[in-house]
Amino acid sequence: MSLYATFNIDSAVQGNKRKDKLFGLFGLLATCVGMLTLAALLMDLMLDGASRLAPHFFTSFPSRFAAQAGILSAWVGTTLVMLVTALTAVPMGVAAGVYLEEYAPKHWLTAIIEINIANLAGVPSIVYGLMALGLFVYQLKLGQSILSAGLTLALLILPIVIVATREAIRAVPASMREAAYALGATKWQTTRDHVLPYSMGGILTGVIIALSRAIGETAPLITIGALTFIAFLPDAPFKAEFPFVSFDWLLSPFSVMPIQMFNWVSRPQQEFHLNAAATGLVLMIMTLAMNGIAIYFRYRFRKRIKW
Amino acid sequence: MSQVQTRTDRIRIRSVAHTSSSASAWRNYRERTIELILFLCALSSVAITLGIVWILLKESWQFFAQVSIVDFLTDTQWTVLFENPRYGIMPLVTGTLVTSTVALLVALPLGTTIAIYLSEYASARVREVLKPILEMLSAVPTVVFGYFALLFVTPLLQSILSDLPGFNMLSAGMVIGVMIIPYVSSLSEDAMRAVPTTVREGSYAMGATRLQTALRVLIPAAFSGIASAYVLGFSRAVGETMVVAIAAGTQPNLTINPMEGAATITAYIVQVSLGDLPHGSIAYQSIFAAGLTLMGITLIFNIGGYLLRKKFREIY
């Protein structure tokens, strides 16, 4: 009896309930830390960099004089590298995803491929850069070029594209495939005409997120030898005279926006930090916009398709 | 009109049936070719791994032909680019481990708290809004985080700790920590949500609060998934390059004090790559040996995580 008297169950319950509520508040606070950091980051970039965001910032080459410097060669480089990356990683990644989800028989080789893709997600990006330096730049003699850079980033985002494709394809119900088979379609016809179109929303979301990650990658491109100061543009891909297209730009040296920003951050002078902030702002707007579009796609396709 | 169409359709069907054997041979051939192409694309991911291992081992092999592996592991100086080079990887390894430890001290408590909050407390609508915003954190280019660490966090810390140098591992580590929160929280949340509702309801039926359920039932039950999240977070922190290269300095420094500046393995690779090094020189090969060490550290922690998971695995 005396035991019951000393242990007040009501106050214990109250205490536990209070702790429970308190933790809810704590959780919200922890989430806010992440969001506040994001907000502080954006504010910091805007306060420092907004004054530099004039049109001539996008149409000038880097310069010794901070106020005249711009990111022309950097954004052109980023665009061309991304072009190579997208044209390599998207077809290969989607094809690999289709194979693993629709075709792959269950045996040891498939298992190895799957384990391997999971492990690649944990490989530091700079290691991809080292591999590309040894393989693309020196072994295959592609040089420190846009082609090498594009391929490096393509390998880096390949696992992301594969995983996104697989998830999107897995969401297509088996009844869709069975209906196509029942009408005499082959496996490839079913995949091309039914499975892929239905999963396009998910694949597109994954591709955009993967590309937004590639845009911000710096370390692997420094490793393969991107230049930090470049005052010319690669050869134009389209020409006025025959044969109208040229691929010389693929082997041209290059710089990209994150590397330009890194170069400016590393300088001791304050004025160059403003340029870095402006470049960072452009990068942030691009990646956030791409992620926003991806989230919108995901939301829309999820709403529209009802099996 | 419709009758005519039906008749031509019938004729067409008959003619298709007539040539079906050659058509189906062509069809089979095409199907096989496409399957082969798709298979090769899937196999390319394995080729990436083999390529990484092959290049790292090949170049490191040449490095270790000139530098003894004992010196590499025990020497306390890393001065590859100096007159009398010394090749002790220890200062770079401690730099990497100190920044990663600071990062994990930030990311693990915050990430786990967020995971519990999102999975057990937040309503579906709140979660729908908060999760994408949180994931934006991992979408921000790392070079931007580097800028933030050097020119925002470090001055902020200096106003509290007045003798903090401009390049220090503390601010770099903290920023990396915030950066990897989404990796930790997302995977942990998935793991907690995957625990069957009946387990949760059992706990509630015994009178446990949400917090007690989360701490004493869900975390042990989801331990396997949470450990994977931690290991991935650690891999990210160890491999992070731009934040440390910008904010932690490029001077190898054998210390475990996060208030000092020190180069990490990744920062060293960046520093060497920025210079124009001749292909085949020992400094060129040293970045591959450094990369191999980085992979080794990641591998050790991944295996450790695997063993831990196996030991505490709960199956429903």
Image: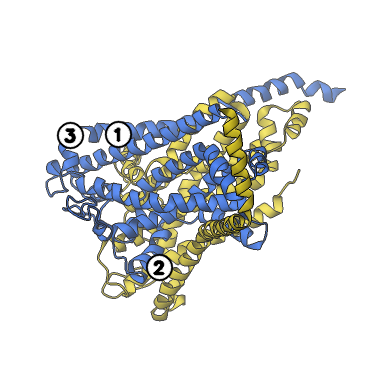
Chain colours: A blue, B yellow
Badge 3: how crowded within 10 Å, few (<14), some, or many (20+)? few
Badge 1: how crowded within 10 Å, few (<14), some, or many (20+)? some
Q: In this picture, is B196 found above or below B96? A: above
Residue at 41 percent of width and 51 percent of height: B258
Residue at 38 percent of width and 53 percent of height: B241
Residue B252 in view (yes/no): no
Quarter of the image holding residue A184? top right
**Separation of residues labelled 2 and 3 (CA atoms):** 42 Å
Q: Which amino acid does label 3 sit on?
A: Ala
Q: Position of residue A273 (x, y in %)?
A: 22, 43
User: Which residue in the protein does label 1 denote?
Assistant: A44
For the residues beneath circles 3 and 1, the answer to whether they share a chain is yes
Element at badge 3?
A: loop
Q: Which amino acid does label 1 sit on?
A: Asp
In the rendered structure, the answer to whether residue A271 lies left or right of residue B235 reads left
Q: Which of A260 and B282 lies nearest the eye of the viewer?
A: A260
Task: Find out whether the residues at labels 2 and 1 contact each other: C-beta distance under 8 Å.
Answer: no
Q: Which amino acid does label 2 sit on?
A: Phe
Quarter of the image holding residue B194? top right
Q: Which of A159 and B191 lies nearest the eye of the viewer?
A: A159
Q: In this picture, is A139 found above or below A256? A: below
Q: Which mark is residue A54?
A: 3
Mark 1 belongs to chain: A
Q: Residue furthest bottom?
A: B65
Mark 2 belongs to chain: B
User: Which residue in the protein does label 2 denote?
Assistant: B288
